[in-house]
Amino acid sequence: MPLVIGVTKELTPGERRVALVPDVAKKYQGLGAALLLESGAGSSAYYQDEDYAPAELAGDGLSVLQKADVILQVQPLGVEALQQLKAGTVLVGLQQPWSSAERVAVLRQKNITCFALELLPRISRAQSMDVLSSQAAVAGYECALIAADHSPKFFPMLTYAAGTIRPAKVLVIGAGVAGLQAIATAKRLGAMVSGYDVRPETKEQIESLGAKFVDTGVSAAGTGGYARELTDDEKRQQAEKLGRAIAECDALITTAAIPGRKAPVIVSAEMVARMKPGSVVVDMAAETGGNVAGTVAGEKVWIGQTLIIGPTHIPSRMPVHASDMYAKNLYNFISPFIKDGNLVLDWEDEVMAGACLTHAGELRHAGVKQALGL
Amino acid sequence: MPLVIGVTKELTPGERRVALVPDVAKKYQGLGAALLLESGAGSSAYYQDEDYAPAELAGDGLSVLQKADVILQVQPLGVEALQQLKAGTVLVGLQQPWSSAERVAVLRQKNITCFALELLPRISRAQSMDVLSSQAAVAGYECALIAADHSPKFFPMLTYAAGTIRPAKVLVIGAGVAGLQAIATAKRLGAMVSGYDVRPETKEQIESLGAKFVDTGVSAAGTGGYARELTDDEKRQQAEKLGRAIAECDALITTAAIPGRKAPVIVSAEMVARMKPGSVVVDMAAETGGNVAGTVAGEKVWIGQTLIIGPTHIPSRMPVHASDMYAKNLYNFISPFIKDGNLVLDWEDEVMAGACLTHAGELRHAGVKQALGL
Amino acid sequence: MAMKWLIDASYFVAAILFILGLKGMSSPVSARKGIVWAGVGMVLATVVTFLTPGMNNFALMLLAITLGGAVAWISGKKVAMTDMPQMVAIYNGMGGGAAAAIAAVEFARGEMHGVVVTLLATLGALIGAVSFSGSVIAWAKLQGVMKKAFRLPAQNAVNIVLALVTIAVGAAIVIAPTIDPLLVGAFFVLALLLGVIITLPIGGADMPVVISLFNAFTGLAVGFEGFVMGIPALIIAGIVVGAAGTLLTQLMAKAMNRPISNILFVPMAGAASGGEAVEGEQKELGAMDAAALMRYASKVIIVPGYGMAVAGAQHKVWEMAELLEEAGVEVVFAIHPVAGRMPGHMNVLLAEAGVPYEKIFDLEEINGDFAQADVALVIGANDVVNPSARTDKSSPIYGMPILNADLAQNVIVVKRGKGTGYSGIENALFYKENTRLLYGSAQQAIGEVIQHVKAMSV
Amino acid sequence: MAMKWLIDASYFVAAILFILGLKGMSSPVSARKGIVWAGVGMVLATVVTFLTPGMNNFALMLLAITLGGAVAWISGKKVAMTDMPQMVAIYNGMGGGAAAAIAAVEFARGEMHGVVVTLLATLGALIGAVSFSGSVIAWAKLQGVMKKAFRLPAQNAVNIVLALVTIAVGAAIVIAPTIDPLLVGAFFVLALLLGVIITLPIGGADMPVVISLFNAFTGLAVGFEGFVMGIPALIIAGIVVGAAGTLLTQLMAKAMNRPISNILFVPMAGAASGGEAVEGEQKELGAMDAAALMRYASKVIIVPGYGMAVAGAQHKVWEMAELLEEAGVEVVFAIHPVAGRMPGHMNVLLAEAGVPYEKIFDLEEINGDFAQADVALVIGANDVVNPSARTDKSSPIYGMPILNADLAQNVIVVKRGKGTGYSGIENALFYKENTRLLYGSAQQAIGEVIQHVKAMSV
Amino acid sequence: MDGFVAIYIFMLAAFTGYEVISRVPVILHTPLMSGSNFVHGVVLVGGMIALGQAETPLEQALGFVAVLLGAANAAGGYVVTERMLAMFKSKEKK
Amino acid sequence: MDGFVAIYIFMLAAFTGYEVISRVPVILHTPLMSGSNFVHGVVLVGGMIALGQAETPLEQALGFVAVLLGAANAAGGYVVTERMLAMFKSKEKK
Ligand SMILES: NC(=O)c1ccc[n+]([C@@H]2O[C@H](COP(=O)([O-])OP(=O)(O)OC[C@H]3O[C@@H](n4cnc5c(N)ncnc54)[C@H](OP(=O)(O)O)[C@@H]3O)[C@@H](O)[C@H]2O)c1
Ligand SMILES: NC(=O)c1ccc[n+]([C@@H]2O[C@H](COP(=O)([O-])OP(=O)(O)OC[C@H]3O[C@@H](n4cnc5c(N)ncnc54)[C@H](OP(=O)(O)O)[C@@H]3O)[C@@H](O)[C@H]2O)c1
Ligand SMILES: NC(=O)c1ccc[n+]([C@@H]2O[C@H](COP(=O)([O-])OP(=O)(O)OC[C@H]3O[C@@H](n4cnc5c(N)ncnc54)[C@H](O)[C@@H]3O)[C@@H](O)[C@H]2O)c1
Ligand SMILES: NC(=O)c1ccc[n+]([C@@H]2O[C@H](COP(=O)([O-])OP(=O)(O)OC[C@H]3O[C@@H](n4cnc5c(N)ncnc54)[C@H](O)[C@@H]3O)[C@@H](O)[C@H]2O)c1
């Protein structure tokens, strides 16, 4: 009996991605694995059941959960779904480990081997498995488009028969993967872009895209490519300098995040109040609380004459490519351990071991253990 | 008593532009004219009443209509509003002359001098007054953004850690002012763009933006920069070649128009059916019937796995700059006749005379006369 | 002996300085150093010549030097910059005259050794005399002293016959065992006449080429007389100038697109020029001149048009602008409201090329600046710089505001040929006095300009 | 008389051909024509020499020519391309030897007229002999016949003393009223020894410069012997080569970043080289070499990295690529999945520069092609071409797929200095045999390359 | 001087003259013409020697003319060239 | 030959040599070195004349060496240069 890899429809509302795309399905089959797909799993991302052939199709998600040895998912499975799994099932996908106490209990109890790609060590070799990066790239691009689309102004400079329109000013706060992508996209559209981040090395990175760096004199270099939280004093200084840049811009895109925590609030209500009429804010961090005071996740709110957009499920706005990237990341993560139709995990592998949330009834990840108080 | 120039809130639902912006208001005042502004007229375009100071503010539109000598408007005034005007009032703005039989009757009866900027002769000197061009530029840009925003794919090429995403293919049909702008914007975003138009000179123009021209071998060069309608045979040939290009693209933007007529239907239901799952169509001509079979103005409809968007009031998506451009166009049209606070029309002026719909009780424009059967 | 050695050595150094001087003058960077070096060589050679043993007539010599030198120096200082070409012509003619006079002295002394020396002396005399009288005519024409272009009925035939006769007389002098003063006299008269006859029919526009040719002639003549008198400094300087001058003449003729033969030999069929365009002629210039004009300008305004878009030349244009800026030139872009074929056409392209927004100005912002610009570079634009929009009521573009490119000191227009623009009308700007056309598709033409700008910035 | 005239004229023509030949060889376009012209000149000069009146020993002469010519011809044909430098050295040494031998014959005949001629003969002999023995040593070292670099204790002092003694003996020969065979013999021995002693300590990398120097020496020696024998063809060819060779030596030394004095005079302080980097040295190359390598390549793969982004060099890079393509080179871009600092970083930049999508390949598509590429041009990339990712388990980038730039025939790396990349680790690729570093910020470095590519495409 | 030596000198000088200016920008054509015009002003030296050796009044007269013209050539050539090249001055400093 | 004439020739030839190769791309350094090496192979002519005039066995021996070495210089120089330059062939045709 070869390894059965299962994929279900995503149940989270607003989620349109799928953890397996036809191209990648063929590769799994090439490794000798059998595929079990809930019928219509890819349809929200425009992938048709027949494209996955010769994967086996299941009429409902339940049978997939019950039969599969490995389950690929985008959003974490709910507790009920987890209860359906065979003992020893391997789960691969995003698991929101920092808010997973209840799920972890079930995972341990059912002896499920759960890989949380949020925990993936950020080493060079793991880049091709890094769903956070790939989905952040999608999100950054989308947020820039949302900003341009909602702005009541042109982004590019435009000389026309009766005059000249100066280019819009776009400010991007947080220059991680998503922020840089947003900068690049806004630049492409012709806007005058500045970028800001607490990590000092981002200055060169922002400038390498032809944008300006807003220098506040505050640095928050953390470890592993992530940022640390700032002290209050630093926050005040940052706020002062940033406030000015924010007041000047026509569109503001915020992408700041600190892994495992609520997103930092960087743009205060007072800053928003100083923005120009008709300015637009896209808060990419809305789902984790938002970088901007007043953001409501999933809504567009007006604060004075400023529109604050708090988009959620951003990669789902681009399900075809977001799924494609996601599925390839998962494949790169798990495929080294599939040999001749069998899954042989190698606990010596630092990437695999590092991304493991639970295995054999244990919560394996120290950071998560601490965060959940277990 | 100086000339009073009046501006009211636009009443048409969905219209967010305003015919006068603060910068231009100052210029009118510099010519000695007095301004009468309905309070809040600019607010939908983010222009505040106080920015127009020292214009006089009127609490309601009615008093503006009754007092002003010249009224600047975006959308044509309704019959009721027209009834309120003083005899001899001068109207400047878009008038939808081809569907204005009822309004023309009132205009004539009330001896109103009405300038329809749709009728503006397209000569070089008049380019700075050409609202069709300026608003088309806005619309073209917006349509490209709408397409990008709704596409489930990346427009640009993107190499990331687990592979490469090829750039999206965008096809723009109709390469007038709006079409070229859409091409330029899609190019900016990194898509592979092709363009198509019946006028042969557009080939060079499309290529001058770095896009490809889809050659169908059909030409429909008309007079005055506009296109003529095609014969059935030509339509068939065009359809054949175009069909292939449409089936290949990820996003389709249509902007084809023939002035004074319903927009030509270029993309048939059968062509839409051949499009790829997840493809997006933005039909800029939706308001005048659409270039695509199945377009519904103001709605997004799914035909199979293809999303067809029929946006309306497109320039209102960008009211700040659209109003700014529009207001400058109007100013360039009417200001040459304002001297020391008086309006002195010069009927020798070919641009002014050419744009006149009614004056002194007469319907002046031969083409409109014919079209309305008067 | 020591004196002779000193003199020889000085001549040697002078010769080197002349060569280095010319080398210097062939690059804008070192040109001024070049003339100074050559000047030092000249002073050295002149001063040591006074030390030559066995010389007489020092008073006369000093008088001649003072007189000739002073008059030339003062007139050279005073003359207007625009009259420079004729001054070069006349000074060059004097050099040719001097060479001829030296030959005359040698003939008068009757001391020539051998056929070769006589041959060289005669050749030098011929060339020098032709250069002398020809240069005088060239000067007279350019100076306006002589107005019309005189043309003999069978100009070419007359030229050839006269030349053959002169050469025959010269040959007779060389062959004759002793020197016959009559023959020599006739020879000089013929040679002088030849110079006049050749130069008379040549028109003003071709004059620089002819002057350059006479310059090469004088060089050769000096070189030959150097052989006769055995002074290597004269030989080297003369021959080097002769060779350099010949090349230069070719280069100049090429830059003007006129083969030398066309200039010297009058075309057979009737009158030459005759206005082909109503308002003058489109004057071409090469990429190198365009490059030099801009490289040594203070301010350049670039006016892009639809042609730049068609050629896809925006990247090249920006590269050129950057190079010019590196060289200290102020470069800005002027965008006309309706340049191209859609609103913002030029913006899209310039953004694509990476031109920063601060360098882009619209019509209202920039129109006052053209008068201060050294060069307006119009790239594939036509209607938007057509001055008839200002004045000609019948023009289809009458009333459209235009970019005042015509007010710049120099206008360079890059286009492929005589194509009109969107409105299909002629553009008087292209025929203006201070306008030059750089023909070619913009991408390639600007590419060449770039190459030359780089060469000038080494 | 007629024969003498024919011979002289032939020498004259040969001299012109030599000059034109060298001129031709200084541009890639005409280089092959150049050697052919020089060859024709050589044959002409050799053939007419047989006609010289009053010559004997024809049999010996033919034998020597046949022998020397045939051996050299055949060995020249057979030698591997990589062994060319030592062949040039040895042939050059033979030329020097020939010049010295001619001087020896003249000394043996004892017929020298005047101090100047003796001086020239002696100088020629000295230079020729040094060039001869030095070249032989250079050959031996390059060929591997002589393995170690011999270095005397006080090398520089020994060199100077030996040179002074040799010159003193030479001076004695010149001053002496008659020629003393003993003195002459000693002189030649000393001169030969000098060549050996100078060359012995020079390392293999510096050899080309030294060979070029000896080449200039031989030229001068030939020129001097030409003066002695009164054969202008020798004078001209010799001196022209002497001057050209001197310039060339300077250019080569400059291209290698080694002043000539550093090469000839051993640095005082102990051993010279000494490995500073673990796995070898980073070998620099100039923009001109980079340009030439790519201009004459068939296929170039460009690997852009974060450094290109930092430098904002994308426009320049694409311009260079276009120029190369015009010259017939196939140029493609290879984008590593994680080049830069965000997904698609390189895509954004290349799109901005206008690189068409068809020219952009990702890792999987292109990795097989590097082995067929003549040049891999790595621009500001580091980690993504680091071969340690393949093999070194301890490396932080172990396991990351990399672009196989190291498989290309030549690798050119553009970076500012010894900065590491994102992972902060050394890159063995930069120290590989076939890798050359072009230092500088990418924008400026590629700009220079462009300039040189253009110069080569005239 | 020996005939062939003269020709060699001629040939080499011609080569030198040709090479030295073979890559001159058009903007320098006129100054360079003027500069080479100055250089052949060295004919003055020939004139001086001719005049210095002149004995008869005719010879003296001709010699005088030669020196006069030569001096004018040299002096005028220098001044004019110098003025033309002055326009390259400001830029050189940058 | 007169001393100063010799120096003039020297000077001019040096100028010519210098100018002729002053703008040579690095890729041509080695071929050009080889080519100029070939050119001074004309020393063969000197050797031939020396040998042609040789009378004593010593002179003959030395002359023989001169010709032998000169011929090797010329022949070897040509072949090697020709081979090096052959790599520019394919490109020229384009
Ligand atoms: N901006 C808008 O919204 C808009 C819309 C519609 C119409 N227009 C009209 O378009 C015109 C724009 O003026 P413009 O000055 O930009 O353009 P233009 O007047 O159309 O002139 C373009 C010039 O470019 C030259 N050209 C074409 N291809 C070239 C190439 N590859 N390289 C170099 N030169 C090339 C042509 O001359 P050769 O053939 O000799 O090369 C032509 O003279 C105006 O009349 C305007 O009214 C503008
Ligand atoms: N793409 C992504 O999504 C992403 C995200 C995060 C991290 N990363 C990491 O980033 C790295 C990308 O590799 P890479 O090869 O592109 O870059 P890299 O390894 O960071 O190397 C960049 C090189 O460019 C040189 N450089 C810097 N400025 C320069 C300039 N102005 N001109 C010329 N050279 C310059 C530096 O050397 P000098 O200082 O000597 O000039 C340096 O060696 C990988 O390690 C990848 O894992 C990628
Ligand atoms: N080595 C690897 O393999 C690898 C892989 C992926 C990402 N990375 C690196 O990790 C870094 C972080 O990536 P990410 O996008 O996942 O980060 P993220 O999503 O965790 O955070 C986004 C950005 O917000 C910034 N930020 C946090 N607090 C802020 C504040 N108060 N004000 C302003 N900005 C604030 C962070 O510095 C970060 O740049 C990136 O620079 C990326 O290059 C490395
Ligand atoms: N001379 C001037 O001053 C001036 C001013 C403005 C515009 N113009 C020119 O007028 C032209 C039309 O401008 P517009 O944008 O107002 O046009 P429009 O909005 O009337 O039409 C849009 C485009 O649709 C095209 N079209 C019509 N039927 C079609 C079909 N069946 N298939 C494909 N395409 C079809 C037309 O050719 C036109 O290009 C433009 O090229 C513009 O350059 C000139």
Image (cartoon, coloured by chain):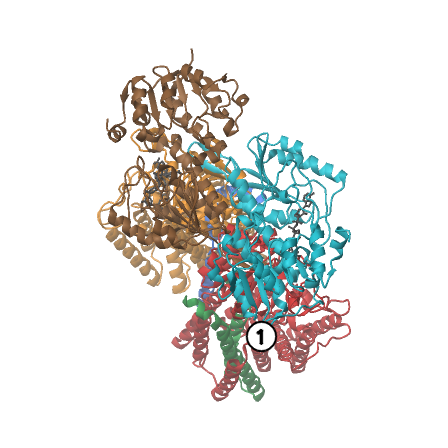
Chain colours: A cyan, B brown, C orange, D red, E blue, F green
The relative height of residue C158 versus residue A305 in the rendered view (above or below) is below
> What residue appears at the point 27 percent right and 27 percent down from the top-left corner?
B365
In the rendered image, the quadrant that contains the C terminus of chain B is top left
**Image coords of residue D300 (percent x, y):** 52, 64
Image side of residue B99 versus residue A290, left or right:
left
Can you see residue D125? yes
Residue type at tag 1: Pro
Can you see residue C439? no
**Image coords of residue B336 (percent x, y):** 38, 22
Q: Quadrant of residue C376?
A: top left
Name, please, the residue furthest toward the top. Answer: B1
Q: Is mark 1 within 8 Å of ligand 2?
A: no
Q: Which residue is mark 1?
A: D85
> What residue appears at the point 41 percent right and 37 percent down from the top-left corner?
B136
Depth check, front residue: C68 or A366: A366
Tell me the crowding category of disc 1: few under 14, some 14 to 19, or many 20 or more residues within 10 angstroms, Cα based: many
**Image coords of residue C1 (percent x, y):** 59, 60
| Quadrant in which ligand 1 is drawn | top left
Depth check, front residue: B164 or E34: B164
SS for tag 1?
helix
Image side of residue B125 versus residue D227, left or right:
left
Depth check, front residue: D35 or D19: D35
Q: Quadrant of residue A113?
A: bottom right
The relative height of residue C448 versus residue D182 in the rendered view (above or below) is above
**Image coords of residue C125 (percent x, y):** 38, 54
